[in-house]
Amino acid sequence: MALTNAYVLPTNRIPDLFKKIQDGQAPDRFTIQLLKDWGFKSTNDRAFIPLLKALGFLTADGVPTPRYLEYRDHSRSKQVLGQAIREAYADIFLIKKHPTTSDKNAVEGKFKSFHNASDNVAGLMTKTFYGLLPLADLSAHSHSKAKVEPASKEIPVPEEVTEKAPSSAAAVHRHQTQDESVLPSTATPENLVVSARRMGGAKRYPSIAACQDDGFREALNPSYALSPT
């Protein structure tokens, strides 16, 4: 968790500073000179820069962050600052989800123990924290993060579909059809002899050979003799 130790002495000027951020153009770099140009000329006002860094409005080099730019949108400024406060003072919200002035002693005690601060410094940290609260909308915290949709549980179907092997019955039928196609359209004895040889001879198709004379059988397989009927 986190708990910033940044604080400012002129806590009554916190609203003025954030008003300037909203109304003015974002600078290339947030400097002490800019604070002076905005009317924050006291040396105590320089502490606003570390506070803005702790809130995520400035980088370590003083360059305005996307959060700084988002805060300039008046319609969202309270939500943006609310998120910044919850991040910078995360440990405070472990004590109370929505701290009020009645929780001031507990908040101050947290600053004192967390940073080993003196009563005076812990008091200034507490005043800075409470000086920010009226400018923020803490209830919008749950809407400040992008919603993540759950991953689909459906398994995608691949575009390529593997061809299924034919069933045994289909394979037999196709084999028979191929064998039948060997037979010529005109089944003369001579053609039957040639076709029978090509298909495996009389042993494979004895019914064909039985319909012909002995010469047909001998031409198919001279060593094969059919049983007399």
Image (cartoon, rainbow, N blue to C red):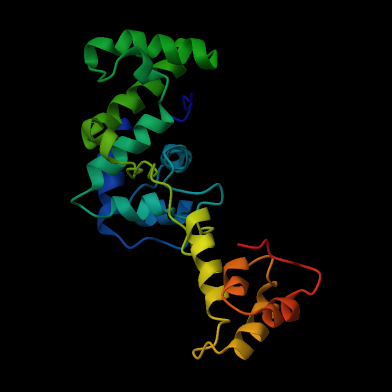
Relative to the observer, which residue lies in front, 147 or 213? Answer: 213
Q: State the image coordinates of residue 160 (x, y, percent, origin top left).
A: 50, 64
Q: Give the tally of numbered discs.
A: 0
Q: With respect to residue 3, does 67 lie above or below?
A: below
The quadrant of the rendering that contains the C terminus is: bottom right
Work out whether residue 84 or residue 104 is closer to the camera in this orientation and state it.
84
Q: Position of residue 202 (x, y in %)?
A: 68, 70
Q: Is residue 217 above or below residue 4?
A: below
Inspect this view and state whether residue 118 appears.
Answer: no
- Which residue sits furthest right? 223
User: 90 above or below 82?
Assistant: above
Residue at position x 65%, y 63% in the image: 228
Farthest front residue?
229
Compared to 157, does 109 lie above or below?
Answer: above
Question: Residue drawn 55% across and 47% down?
Answer: 60
Q: Nearer the viewer, residue 9 or 175?
A: 175
Name the image quarter holding residue 143. Answer: top left
The answer to whether residue 19 of the structure is visible from this angle is: yes
The spot of residue 152 in percent (x, y) is 37, 45
Q: Quadrant of residue 195?
A: bottom right
Across and down, in percent, residue 156 comes to 43, 53
Residue found at x 49% / y 89%: 185
Residue at position x 46%, y 30% in the image: 6
Q: Nearer the viewer, residue 214 or 105?
A: 214
